[in-house]
Amino acid sequence: MAEVSELNAAPGLRARISEAEWQARVKLAQCYHLAAKLRWTDHIYTHFSLRVPGDRPHFLINAYGQTFDEITPETLVKIDIDGEIIDDPTGLGINPAGYVIHGAIHRARPETHAVLHTHTAAGIGVAAQQQGLLMISQHSARFHRRLGYHDYEGIALDLDEQQRIVADLGERNALILRNHGLLTCGRDLEEAFYNLYYLERACVAQIAAQSGGAALSIIPDAVAEKAALAFDNGIRNKKYLLHWDAYVRQLQRNAL
């Protein structure tokens, strides 16, 4: 097994891949580093994935054993839709649960290019609640009638769970894995990141509000839907790119 100090070295990788794949690797590595800065990690145990541009259904995911802040464009593992490793510069392989979850969505939804999955304290806290995400904040209103739930079946190692993950996600771009964590996706990485930002913030707000012990003010359905439609319009116009670009600038300035 490669030592951590060796994991940034991938001689010749850039020369043997397309420029489009290289740019995808750069962007996904940035996403991992942003998640590390934002404390959205569970050490080495969660995963983000991004489809490789091109005709073949390959996607990139983290090597099993790297922390998010260690990941570089060169160390990302490329696998196919069946979970077979195409390119693994680290020799570490991947988390099998990562393939079960991400492979299910990439196979079923080819238009979905990015899938992000986290185990944050706030995300797990809301995932453990029977009522799930409550409409108590503008951030949660973003997901009014736009959020799926998938019941916990144990560690995601069984391939037959894939069909139920896909069914519970449906056509939505956000899913709460009960007793487990959060999952978002998007047509591109920036959209998936935007969705995760809002879902994570909604969960943080819910846990904070519940900790106060006072009765919660629930947003009426009509008002929550009005807010959600406004968010939908912004997504159609790709306003989330402003959000992503600003975060990348902060990352480059080391201002997070």
Image (cartoon, rainbow, N blue to C red):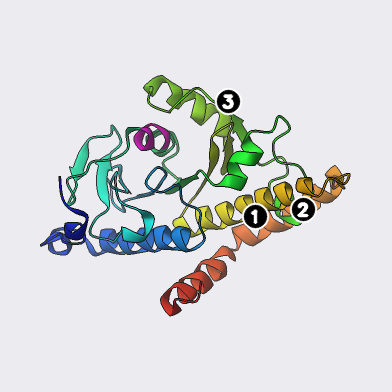
Chain-order first, disc 2 or disc 3: 2
Of residues 84 and 122, the one drawn nearer to the viewer in this rendering? 122
Identify the residue shown where x is 32% and y is 64%. Answer: 26
Q: Residues in magenta?
A: 97-101
Q: Which residue is mark 2?
A: 137
Q: Is residue 62 left or right of residue 89?
A: right
Q: What kind of residue is marked 3?
A: Asp
Report helix, strand or loop for mark 3. loop
Chain-order first, disc 1 or disc 2: 2
- Whether the residues at callouts 1 and 3 have beta carbons within 8 Å, the answer is no
Measuring from the top left, give residue 150's x and y in whole percent: 57, 29
- Residue 120: in magenta span: no
Measuring from the top left, give residue 224's x and y in whole percent: 80, 49
- Whether the residues at callouts 2 and 3 have beta carbons within 8 Å, the answer is no
Q: Which residue is mark 3?
A: 151
Q: Which mark is residue 73?
A: none
Of residues 158 and 59, the one drawn nearer to the viewer in this rendering? 158
Q: Which residue is mark 1?
A: 201
Q: Is residue 34 left or right of residue 232?
A: left
